[in-house]
Amino acid sequence: MTENFEIFLYVPVGGKTLPEQDLIWVNNFSKIFQIGLTQFHQAKIKIISTIFSKDEVKKAIERNSIIIQILLNENIDITSCIQNLPELDKINKDQVIQLNCYPFKKDSLLNDSFKIINFYDEILNKSIKLEENIEKIKDDAWLKLLDLSMEIKRLVNELSKNKKKEVFSKSIFLAYTSPDQNVNRLIIEREIKQLGYNILDPSKSISSEHELRNTINDSLNKSDLSIHIIGNSELPSAPGQDMSIIEYQNKLFVEYVNANKNAKIFRLVWIPPDIKPKTEKQRMYIESFMHQVEAMENTEIVQTPIEIFKTIIQRKLIDRPVMTAENIKSTDGNSKSVYIIYNDSAIDKVNKISSEFEKKNITVLKTEKAQNNIETIRLHHKNLINCDVVLIFQNEDNRLWLNSKISDILKAPGIGRKKRYIAKAIYPVNSTSGISNSLKDLIILDNKVSISESILPIIEILEKYDTSR
């Protein structure tokens, strides 16, 4: 991309002076967002300035610039928002993104005319504090910046082609879910519609087993993506079946894929991170499901906050995995690689392990600490995509850290990985108790022998494996 694109940050304050604290927040946001754009897109996209008047907005729109309307807090001036400009019908709505920086209560005077991104802590329902020191910014803020950055890239691609937003001809199957997840399902439904996809919904066919089966199979045949939500309840039951509709829909998906070997449909299964199964039967189903799904190449199970899941959906629908900012090339076709995931306290032992692998001509991939969090995440994703074997080196008894890394491995297909890992292994800190069992075929290395002996199972697997297949 050779074009220069301008981005203006617009804060609708109705001609008033922005309080100093708010102005500092906007300035910090501008600096941090520019870093994210530069590192993620490596393109000529530049934040020009922050504007506060409606006249400046009109001029920016006329120049085909992108406007990020920042609803900073409850002190915004509704009448100054772009939605209420008299010339709204003449505005290319693809030029505008609305950034909700606090829990925004919908106002009848402010319709949802533009793409909306929530840039606040939706769990705590609070605004995000932005420090000028980027090292102090939390990862969830970087992920929201990543979401915004991806949307900017989409707008730039469309504006550079001088075309209106494309309407996709294919559909998405959005599976029925239990009542406790209806709100999240509506959030996902709205996201899909904003991306221009048609939603195929089986909810009108749940009274008859025959009709439900036919509806689901027909929907899967027409869809590129099948989205399933697993909640706390096993209700409602599928008609004529001793299982829930949620389980029944997943069962039919597997049957469909097995019967249609050339089917290109992909399944995303979302489990809320705060899930609390109401019955023992539901708990056992979830555990069993997580074991089975990992073995399927056309399925990814995701357990993240809803906003991050929306980002994963977006990447799947527009065929834009995280690493498309650069053309990632895996290591040489004949070489084999191991990605070692570790924390700083393990560096000495990891260096010894790396030396042993390199003696066998096995490439070792690591994620060194980068200048900022988003770059570290980018490198981590790159290594998860490219490696043949992934090895978690656990040097401290930190189960939260360990399970988060296992979760990253489970999510690898969602960020662009095409093949299954040759092997997945862990070098435990002491015992294997408490280690998440969500990864199938996880190799537990022996930490009571020498390093060269402990990694021997991985070396033997790699020596037998033909990377060209």
Image (cartoon, rainbow, N blue to C red):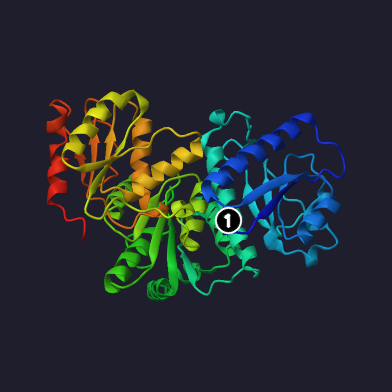
Residue 60: quarter of image: bottom right
Across and down, in percent, residue 339 comes to 29, 41
Image point (82%, 43%), residue name: 13
Q: Is residue 63 left or right of residue 213?
A: right
| Quadrant in which the C terminus appears | bottom left
Across and down, in percent, residue 449 comes to 12, 26
Q: Is residue 205 left or right of residue 291?
A: right
Image point (53%, 75%), residue name: 169
| Residue at the outermost right position | 15
Residue 121, can we see it? no
Across and down, in percent, residue 162 comes to 66, 69
Residue bearing mark 1? 153
Q: Is residue 118 positioned above or below 376 on the image?
A: below
Q: Label 1's element?
A: helix
Image point (32%, 61%), residue name: 242
Q: Is residue 351 positioned above or below 94 on the image?
A: above
Q: Is residue 308 left or right of residue 208?
A: right
Total numbered labels: 1
| Residue at the outermost front position | 2
Image point (29%, 30%), residue name: 394
Please state which of residues 133 and 216 is positioned toward the viewer in this rendering: 133
Across and down, in percent, residue 436 comes to 30, 38
| Quadrant in which the N terminus appears | bottom right
Please state which of residues 360 and 348 is positioned toward the viewer in this rendering: 360
Please state which of residues 100 and 158 is positioned toward the viewer in this rendering: 158
Residue 65, can we see it? yes
What amino acid does circle 1 point to? Lys
